[in-house]
Structures are given as C-alpha cells and as structure tokens.
Amino acid sequence: MTTAAKKTAAKTTAAKKAPPKFKDAIAMLRADHAKVSGLFAEFEKARSSSKKMALVSTICTELSVHAQVEEEVFYPAVKAALKDKSLIPEAVVEQATMKALISQIEGVAPDGEMYDARVKVLAEYVKHHVKEEHTEMFPRAKATRLDMAALGAQMAQRKAELMA
Ligand SMILES: [Fe+2]
Ligand SMILES: [Fe+2]
C-alpha cells in the first residue's frame, strides 16, 4: 500500500470510529448525572481527607456547571416548548437548594461527621432531583419538537466555556 493509500485507509477507519461531535441534550445531561453519581460513590469509600476534598471539589464543579447549563440553555427551551409553569420552576428551586448545600462544602476541609453529613445530604438531594429529571422532565421534553441535537451542541459549547 502506498503512503497515500495508507493515509486514506487510516482516515476512513477514524471516520467510522469517530463519535458524533456532540451528544444530544438529554444524553449529555444523563452522562453528567452518571459521572456525579460515580463521584459520590467514590466519596463514600474515601477515607483520607485529601481524597475526600479532591472528590468534593470535582463534585461541586461538575454540579455547578451542570446546573448553570441547564438553567441557561436546557430549562428555558423545555419550559417554552412545554408552556410549563411548574416542572421547570420546581427544578430551579431544587437547584438553588443544591447550590446552598454546595456552598457549605466547597473549599471546606473535611472536619468530621458534619462534613460527611453535608456531602451525604447533597448526594441524596441530587439523586432525588436527577430522578425527577429522568422520569418526568426528559420524557416530556423528548415528546416536544425540540431539536435535541442543536440544543446539545449549544449546551456543550456553554459547558466548555464554564469549565475553562
Ligand atoms: Fe437539574
Ligand atoms: Fe440535571
């Protein structure tokens, strides 16, 4: 095979294997949820303060960015598409409580049972919030004419900006 042919072959393989550039909006949010859930599970097993603090730092960043992307992009689009007056406002109120819990542990050194309790309550709270998104919000959002691929692209862009 010539070098050029090899290059073409490599390109074709890469093109076949390459994942779509953006996940659709709901797939992206679900992936965030799964990531955070895994981090909370890791926290449960963590014993050292440094490990706990590092995990909490990642959890807080992930949750804050996720909530902001939802509130700036996903929630308004779904609210408008559904002409919703309760589902999204309730989710926003829940996220405000979530942020209050985050502010109590973000950057705080683990100092015993109260710290662990705050992380545990945050984990349970997030689990409840995520369950509502999965069982109520996402199915209703999917049933609308919203372009989830375009919304996902917009969200991925905003997430990248916030993570930078
Ligand atoms: Fe949310
Ligand atoms: Fe979410």
Image (cartoon, rainbow, N blue to C red):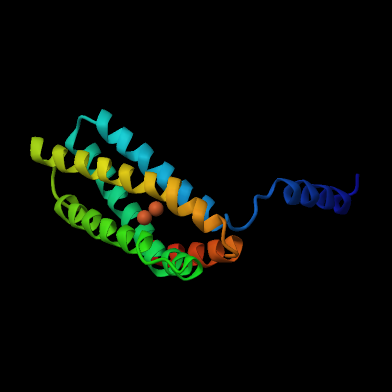
Q: Residue 141 or 8: which is nearer the viewer? A: 141
* Numbered disc total: 0
Q: Residue at x 24, y 60 (%)?
A: 96
Q: Residue at x 51, y 51 (%)?
A: 139
Q: Which quadrant: the N terminus?
A: top right
Location of residue 10 in the rendering, given as x and y in whole percent from the top left corner:
78, 48
In the rendered view, tell whether residue 85 sits above or below residue 124: below
- Horizontal arrangement in the rendering, residue 117 relative to residue 73 (left or right): left
- Looking at the rendering, which quadrant does residue 98 occupy? bottom left
Q: Which quadrant: the C terminus?
A: bottom left
- Looking at the rendering, which quadrant does residue 23 occupy? bottom right
In the rendered view, tell whether residue 25 sits above or below residue 10: below
**Is residue 34 visible in this depiction of the protein?**
yes
- Horizontal arrangement in the rendering, residue 77 relative to residue 14 (left or right): left
Q: Please, which residue is most extreme toward the right here? A: 1
Q: Residue at x 37, y 62 (%)?
A: 88
Q: Residue 1 or 30: which is nearer the viewer? A: 30
Q: Residue at x 31, y 33 (%)?
A: 42
Location of residue 45 in the rendering, given as x and y in whole percent from the top left corner:
27, 28
